Structure formats: C-alpha cells, structure tokens
Image (cartoon, grey):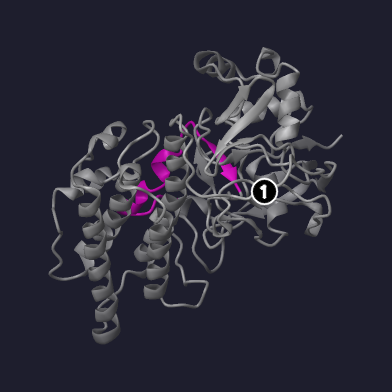
C-alpha cells in the first residue's frame, strides 16, 4: 500500500475513532435480528462485518505491535479471518449466517476490547515512542470504510428478501421525477496520458504505479444512464434480444431469469424498486442502479455506444473535483441530476451515486509488485475474471474515494450500487 499521511491533518488516533463511530452510526437503526442473517453467499451478516474489521486490527496491528496483547477469544481468529491464507484457515464464507455464537453482544464486546487496546497502542506511541505501524493502521481504516459500504449493500440484499419490505431509513421522495438534462458528450483527444496513483495520500497497491497509456480519440457521456433510459431498453425487448448480449451474459440472463435491474419488480404496468427506504416507484430521472456488467454492456450496445475503459474514465476524472452523492448524505440511493446542474469540463456525476462499470479487466498495472506479507493478499490475488468499476457510490464515504480508485467485481454481480456511463469512439 502507498504511504499515507491522513489528508485531514488530524491524528491517526482521531481518524481511527471517527471511522469506528461511523460504523456504529450505521448500526444504530438495526434490531438484533438484522445482525445475524446472511442473504446470499456473496453477502455477509452485519455481525460478521463488525467482527471482521476488528479482527483486522487485532491480527495485523495489535498482535504484532502491542507487547502483551491478548485476544478476548483466540477462536475468533478462525471465525473472522476473511481470506488471508497466510494468517491461517477461515470459516466457510457461504455459511457465515450460521454462526449464531458468538452473539451480537459478544461481538460488540470484542469490538470494544480491540478499541481499548488500539487506544493503548496510540497512547504508548505518544508517551514512550513505541513504533506505530501507521501504514497498516491506515489500510485498516480504509478497509473498514469498504466494509461500511458492504454493510449497506448486504443489509439491502437481506431486507429486500423480506415480503414486509422493511424500512432501514426514511428518505424523502418528491413527485414522479423531474426533467433529465439531455445527454451530451465530452471529447478526449488521442494521445499518451498518465494514470494511476502518485504522490502523497493513501492509495491501495492496485492503484499504482503511475504509468503511461495510449488513449484513442473518444467521447464520454456527460452524465449517468437513467432509469427512464433503461426502461426504454426494457420496453424495446432488451432482455429478450440476444444480439445485444455477451455470450456469458445471455446465458446468465436465461439461467437467472433477469427481466430488469436487481430490486426492480413489475406490478400491473408499473415498475417498482426496493430501496432502504422501502418499496418505491422507479423514478425516471434517477441513475439506474444494481445492474451487472452484462446488463450495462447490453444497454450500451442497444444505445449504439459502449462502456468506457478505466483509462478513459480516469483521464476525465482527474480534471474535476471529487464531489457527489456519498454516504455522508445519508440518502443511500442514487440522486436525480437536476436539469440546471453544471460541472467542470462538461462532465457530471463522476463521483458518488453509483459505481460505474468499465470494459477494462481487473489486472495489474505495468511494473506492479505484490506487497510483502499478508497485505499482499488484499488485492493482487483477485486480479482474474473481474472488471473494474470507478467513481464510488451513494454508499461510499467521500473520504475514501479518489480518481485513481479501482473497485472490481465479477460480471454477473449487481448487489452493489452499480450503474453505467456511456462512451463511444470518435468518428
């Protein structure tokens, strides 16, 4: 991971406290039953997330760096290790929802135990000069922010299965939707550009090294694809016409019976979608969300366009400020784009709202080297059969995202806040 000096200027101890409190704020509306159940193999129970992010600090910070540290229960090392093979075996991921013990209260005590000893570590570093593994702690904080977003989307996948359509948090919704700005295009000149992280501030290892790429002349859409536009795709038989679909995508559609984005359902002639504020009519002006790479690619072909590469996306994103609809807004849903909204360089919604699928395979950059130790397993071993997404979402913290950030998921995945922006090659 890249060396990090907290960009806020606050101490690492303060940042630690802030990130941990953000996790607790997310849990405040939950009932104890909400913590335990696992909706699907790709998701995890909220209780497991709480324990795992604490396990990370225990396993990678406290045990190696705080003399005399003792775990509250050594068996947790097996239960809450996610995928770090170099640190030992792990409990089978699809069965995490079967772990009724330790209880939620036990996990909360475990979290408090870790917090107390992290505080001790910070105090010792201040008082006696005990070496502080700042890089590893910063990774742990960013790791917890990633799990905060996963908690949002995993909870949504769980509550959506409930026929009562539970409400996690109320959200104001006014009217059926307003006017959407006409889509325009922003050009990228042909040439050699540099992408990837360089300089100060935190970045994951997969964001570097900074390197040169050749980009052909192309154009990016100035905004995200909307639900209204996706409804047109559906109405035109988009889910019934194989000419728009990649072969694996068409097979997946047939196997899983997709008829629209995840959490959409049709009642009579109206499309509804489940949100964390409950079941709502689909708003035509909102960015379409919860679509797989296959659906995003099929829509782009239907629209006479394509998905951008991650290099094309980053070349534009580096020109604009990191602003958007993030988790701090507490909407937990993509926000409509006002018709009078304007942004620098003619592009809008590059950050926040939805993660944007790209056509780029998740692979190492030229010159990439896997970090030593357990953190080498954080990103590198997943560089296979996945695609890159960019920009963050309404579930991402604004303190966690940057133009070089590379998220990655498998093509059929769609339970995250995933959407798309169109691109096209220059004539």
Q: Please, which residue is most extreme toward the bottom here? A: 127
Q: Which residue is mark 1?
A: 335
Label 1's element?
loop
Quarter occupied by residue 96:
top left
Residue 247: x percent and y percent? 59, 16
Residue 139 visible (yes or no): no
186 is higher (above) or lower (below) than 25: above
- Left or right: where does residue 20 sit relative to residue 2? left
Q: Is residue 143 left or right of residue 176?
A: left
Seen from the viewer's position, the closer of residues 83 and 158 is 158
**Over which residues does the magenta segment extend?**
369-390
Q: Residue at x 61, y 20 (%)?
A: 259
Q: Residue at x 47, y 71 (%)?
A: 6
Quick check: is 374 in the magenta stretch? Answer: yes
Coordinates of residue 424 in the picture (x, y in percent) = 78, 35
Does the magenta portion include 209? no
Q: Mark yes or no: residue 78 visible.
A: yes
Percent across and percent down for residue 227 are 70, 35
Q: Is residue 282 above or below residue 124?
A: above
Lateral position of residue 283 relative to residue 379, left or right? right
| Quadrant containing the N terminus in the rendered view | bottom left
Which corner quadrant holds the C terminus? Answer: top right
Q: Residues within 10 Å of mark 1 (few under 14, many from 20)?
A: some
Q: Which sits in the foreground, 76 or 273?
A: 273
Along the viewing direction, whichever of 385 and 407 lies nearer the viewer: 407
Please give the name of the residue rendered at 19% of the width and 44% of the height, measured from the top-left corner: 78
């Amino acid at each position: 991971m890249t060396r990090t000096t907290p960009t806020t200027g606050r101490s690492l101890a303060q940042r630690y406290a802030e990130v941990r409190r953000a996790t607790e704020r997310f849990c405040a509306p939950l009932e104890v039953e909400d913590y335990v159940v696992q909706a699907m193999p790709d998701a995890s129970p909220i209780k497991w997330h709480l324990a795992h992010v604490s396990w990370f600090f225990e396993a990678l910070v406290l045990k190696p760096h705080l003399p005399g540290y003792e775990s509250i229960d050594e068996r947790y090392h097996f239960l809450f290790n996610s995928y770090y093979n170099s640190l030992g075996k792990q409990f089978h991921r699809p069965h995490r929802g079967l772990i009724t013990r330790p209880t939620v209260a036990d996990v909360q005590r475990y979290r408090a135990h870790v917090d107390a000893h992290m505080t001790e570590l910070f105090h010792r570093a201040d008082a006696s000069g005990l070496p502080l593994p700042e890089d590893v702690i910063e990774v742990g904080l960013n790791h917890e922010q990633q799990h905060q977003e996963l908690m949002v989307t995993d909870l949504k996948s769980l509550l959506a299965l409930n026929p009562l359509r539970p409400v996690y948090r109320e959200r104001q919704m006014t009217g059926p939707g307003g006017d959407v700005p006409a889509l325009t295009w922003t050009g990228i000149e042909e040439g050699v550009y540099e992408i990837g992280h360089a300089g100060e501030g935190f970045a994951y290892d997969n964001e570097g090294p900074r390197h040169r790429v050749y980009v052909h002349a192309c154009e990016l859409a100035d905004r995200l694809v909307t639900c209204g536009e996706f409804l047109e795709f559906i109405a035109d038989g988009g889910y019934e016409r194989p000419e728009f679909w990649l072969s694996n995508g068409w097979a997946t559609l047939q196997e899983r019976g997709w008829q629209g984005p995840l959490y959409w359902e049709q009642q009579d002639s109206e499309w509804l979608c489940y949100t964390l504020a409950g079941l709502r009519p689909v708003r035509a002006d909102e960015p379409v969300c919860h679509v797989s790479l296959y659906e995003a690619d099929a829509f782009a072909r239907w629209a006479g366009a394509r998905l951008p590469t991650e290099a094309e996306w980053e070349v534009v994103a580096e020109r604009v400020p990191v602003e958007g609809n993030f988790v701090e807004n507490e909407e937990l849903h993509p926000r409509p784009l006002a018709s009078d909204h304007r942004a620098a360089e003619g592009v809008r919604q590059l950050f926040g709202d939805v993660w944007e699928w790209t056509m780029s395979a998740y692979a190492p950059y030229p010159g990439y080297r896997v970090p030593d130790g357990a953190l080498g397993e954080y990103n590198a071993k997943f560089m296979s059969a996945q695609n890159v997404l960019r920009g963050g979402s309404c579930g991402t913290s604004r303190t966690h995202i940057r133009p070089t950030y590379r998220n990655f998921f498998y093509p059929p995945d769609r339970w995250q806040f995933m959407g798309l922006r169109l691109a096209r090659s220059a004539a």
